[in-house]
């Protein structure tokens, strides 16, 4: 087992990369669903309900199902990450758009803005802090799920943790666990600070 | 439906055998989590200055992936059922503590003033005003913990604690898709059923006056942090 700093850095990068790709895939789906289904309360409730069911399925079980459908490897993991990322982004985008003060929409209309302009220049910027919070949640979840991606032979820091657990090799275990923990904590803290700055600009 | 009976005939006893330790781990860890975290969360609301760093630390801890948590504590705790229960209980504290604290703190201060004005003691205010109003949020925290625990308990099999994870991991190792499903399907169903039951419980404990407001709209970004 290669425990050199270079290899750990590579695995950390892979870990972050896979998590981000998965989050973006799910985030785009969640965002589009929220925007498309927003005019129909029943459909949006159904979509959120379905996404909640997916979210409730334990990571290892979901990966096991996907493994049977898509085989071993990174692609399967990214599909799983995407599925988990839908709910936080879908929910927060919907909440963010619904919570925009109607006064602003009225002002936009009064200024002669088209629906598209109101959406792009008023609604999205005002909802943005909440959307970003959803993405942060999704990314933290993804980093966690990526650690168990090792069971479907995906890359990332889980490989070190799993080998360590299997061979009772504490150094390997910690070499995977410590960077993974730091990665999750760092993403959470940095994105939370970023959100605070953005919301200050918005309000 | 014959494949279902075939499946059950070959894997039923295996599933039931693994379900026992799994439910045991989830139940014990959840109980310990509730017993410690609910009073602690209430206590924190009485010391607001100490509370925000504690809640901050708790939130940061919650972002640590469960497999990582197991790996970090294994060198100190060793392997087997007891270390698994320790890790699971520690982990189940976090959502319950956070939700109890956030819930109790968000009770409208004017309601507490009104209660005080009626001559209620601190204890009466807690048990007759704050807790009933907070119950749905606390139950949401317990629900999160319970659903997470089903998931984390699968990973406990990696440190030799048994449970449904055993079936999933042997299934993956031996490329035996039926064995894999024999572990994964009950795990997923268990999480869904437990989530559903606590969802019902939340409805039961919601005070009648609050039912009109959409309780499901308790800020989810606030209560939903991570999932592995």
Image: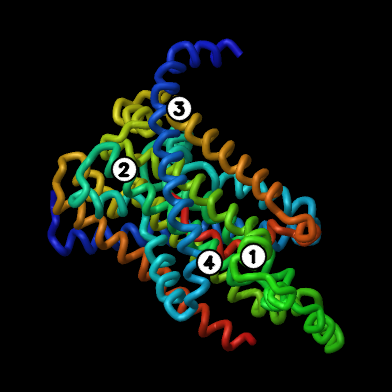
Mark 2 element type: helix
Instruction: Return the disc, 1 or 3, that comes first in the chain's sequence.
Output: 1
Instruction: Return the disc, 1 or 4, that comes first in the chain's sequence.
Output: 4
Above or below: residue A89 compared with residue A123: above
How packed mark 1 is, by other alpha carbons closer than 10 Å (few <14, some 14-19, many 20 or more), is: some
Instruction: Return the disc, 1 or 2, that comes first in the chain's sequence.
Output: 2
Q: Is residue B63 left or right of A135 when viewed as pictured?
A: left
Q: Distance between the residues labelled 3 and 4?
A: 39 Å
Disc sitting over residue B124 in the figure: 1
Mark 1 element type: helix
Of all chains, the one bearing label 3 is: B
Mark 3 element type: helix
Whole-percent x, y for residue B185 in the image: 50, 30
Above or below: residue B118 compared with residue B136: below
Disc sitting over residue B84 in the figure: 2
Mark 3 — residue? B181
**Tag 3 and tag 2, C-beta contact below 8 Å:** no
Mark 4 — residue? B101
Look at discs 1 and 4 and give the one toward the viewer: 1
Residue at 58 percent across and 76 percent down: it is A129
Whole-percent x, y for residue B59 in the image: 43, 66
Mark 4 element type: helix
Residue at 54 percent across and 62 percent down: it is B100
State whether discs 3 and 4 lie on one chain.
Answer: yes
Look at discs 3 and 2 and give the one toward the viewer: 2
How packed mark 3 is, by other alpha carbons closer than 10 Å (few <14, some 14-19, many 20 or more), is: many
Q: How far apart are marks 1 and 2 (CA)?
A: 38 Å
Instruction: Return the disc, 3 or 2, that comes first in the chain's sequence.
Output: 2
Look at discs 1 and 3 and give the one toward the viewer: 1
- Quadrant in the rendering for residue A201: bottom right
């Amino acid at each position: 087992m290669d425990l050199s700093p270079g290899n750990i850095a590579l695995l950390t990068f892979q870990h972050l990369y896979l998590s981000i790709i998965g989050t973006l895939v799910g985030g785009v789906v969640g965002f589009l669903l929220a925007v498309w289904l927003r005019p129909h309360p029943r459909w949006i409730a159904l979509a959120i309900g379905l996404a909640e069911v997916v979210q409730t399925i334990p990571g290892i079980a979901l990966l096991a199902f996907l493994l049977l459908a898509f085989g071993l490897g990174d692609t399967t993991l990214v599909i799983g990450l995407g599925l988990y990322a839908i709910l936080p982004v879908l929910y927060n985008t919907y909440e963010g758009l619904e919570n925009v003060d109607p006064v602003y929409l009225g002002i936009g209309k009064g200024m002669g803005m088209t629906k598209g302009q109101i959406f792009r220049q008023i609604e999205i910027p005002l909802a943005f802090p909440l959307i970003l919070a959803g993405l942060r949640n999704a990314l933290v979840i993804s980093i966690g799920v990526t650690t168990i991606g090792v069971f479907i032979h995906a890359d990332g820091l889980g490989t070190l943790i799993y080998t360590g657990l299997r061979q009772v090799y504490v150094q390997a275990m910690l070499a995977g666990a410590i960077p993974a923990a730091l990665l999750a904590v760092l993403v959470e803290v940095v994105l939370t600070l970023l959100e605070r700055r953005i919301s200050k600009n918005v309000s | 439906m014959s494949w279902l009976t075939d499946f059950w005939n070959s894997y039923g006893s295996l599933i039931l055998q693994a379900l026992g330790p799994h439910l045991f781990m989830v139940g014990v860890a959840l109980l310990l989590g509730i017993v410690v975290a609910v009073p602690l969360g209430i206590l924190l609301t009485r010391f607001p200055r100490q509370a925000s760093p504690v809640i901050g630390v708790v939130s940061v801890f919650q972002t640590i992936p469960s497999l990582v948590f197991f790996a970090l504590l294994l060198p100190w705790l060793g392997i087997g059922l007891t270390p698994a229960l320790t890790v699971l209980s520690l982990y189940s504290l976090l959502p319950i503590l956070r939700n109890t604290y956030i819930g109790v703190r968000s009770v409208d201060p004017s309601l507490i003033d009104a209660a005080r004005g009626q001559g209620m003691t601190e204890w009466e205010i807690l048990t007759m005003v704050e807790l009933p109003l907070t119950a749905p949020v606390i139950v949401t925290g317990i629900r999160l913990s319970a659903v997470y625990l089903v998931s984390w308990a699968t990973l406990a099999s990696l440190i030799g604690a048994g449970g449904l994870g055993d079936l999933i991991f042997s299934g993956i190792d031996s490329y035996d898709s039926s064995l894999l499903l024999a572990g994964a399907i009950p795990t997923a169903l268990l999480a869904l059923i437990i989530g559903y039951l606590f969802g019902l419980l939340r409805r039961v404990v919601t005070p009648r006056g609050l039912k009109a407001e959409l309780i499901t709209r308790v800020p989810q970004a606030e209560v939903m942090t991570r999932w592995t």
